Amino acid sequence: AQSVTQLDSHVSVSEGTPVLLRCNYSSSYSPSLFWYVQHPNKGLQLLLKYTSAATLVKGINGFEAEFKKSETSFHLTKPSAHMSDAAEYFCVVSRDTGRRALTFGSGTRLQVQP
Amino acid sequence: EADIYQTPRYLVIGTGKKITLECSQTMGHDKMYWYQQDPGMELHLIHYSYGVNSTEKGDLSSESTVSRIRTEHFPLTLESARPSHTSQYLCASSESGGSNQPQHFGDGTRLSIL
């Protein structure tokens, strides 16, 4: 079975400083991993995905994530936070069942201080 | 920008009413999903569909039902709403293929049962 653990429920950074949102996963096979962002009262938007190609994945809005199999991690980073980055972020792992659905982490709320 | 639409965006209604939440996508995706999300929590899959006339229940037990008569349309129905049904409901779709296909989300329906 797959599982996803987002290590921080809340992260607060100052505008212009780096962002690190941590995610660990467990899977019995080589999974696909995703990061989604959810702004208030909106649906989820795909930031980036890892599908066993390059381990460093670049996404939209300057975000990137690195897949580290030895650490079973898929942390999301951004060099410089912007106020518009304030949102909820979900780390997601694909399932190895026939459902082709996703397992979501519990989310990390990112606050960006001016 | 994903072309998946949910209506209504917000619904406040009394106990015992029949409710249908609409979800439509214009991308021709075979796979569609319904998730339930409580405030500040992760998403839980309640229904999914591989295609027309194919629906299955997800992980989280739900008293709702779904139908998939047309590829683009995946409505969710509650026959008799109760306060315990108060939540946000998110619809998603994805292309056929492996588990590396990302899901595209609608903006959600925030449902409140009085």
Image: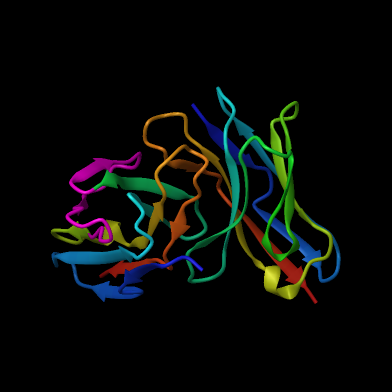
Q: Residue at x 35, y 39 (%)?
A: B59
In the rendered image, residue B20, in percent from the top left (x then y), is placed at 20, 65
Q: Residue at x 28, y 58 (%)?
A: B85
Q: Residue at x 43, y 40 (%)?
A: B97
Please tell me which residue lies in front, A86 or B17.
A86
Please tell me which residue lies in front, B86 or A110.
A110
In the rendered image, residue B110, in percent from the top left (x then y), is placed at 37, 68
Q: Is residue A1 magenta?
A: no
Q: Is residue B69 magenta?
A: yes
In the rendered image, residue B33, in percent from the top left (x then y), is placed at 35, 51
From the viewer's perspective, tell me whether residue B23 is left or right of residue A69: left
Q: Residue at x 73, y 58 (%)?
A: A63
Residue range highlighted in magenta = B52-75
From the viewer's perspective, tell me whether residue A64 is left or right of residue B64: right
From the viewer's perspective, tell me whether residue A37 is left or right of residue A82: left
Please tell me which residue lies in front, A91 or A112.
A91
Q: In the orientation shown, which residue stands out farthest toward the top?
A: A28
Q: Is residue A1 above or below residue A103?
A: above
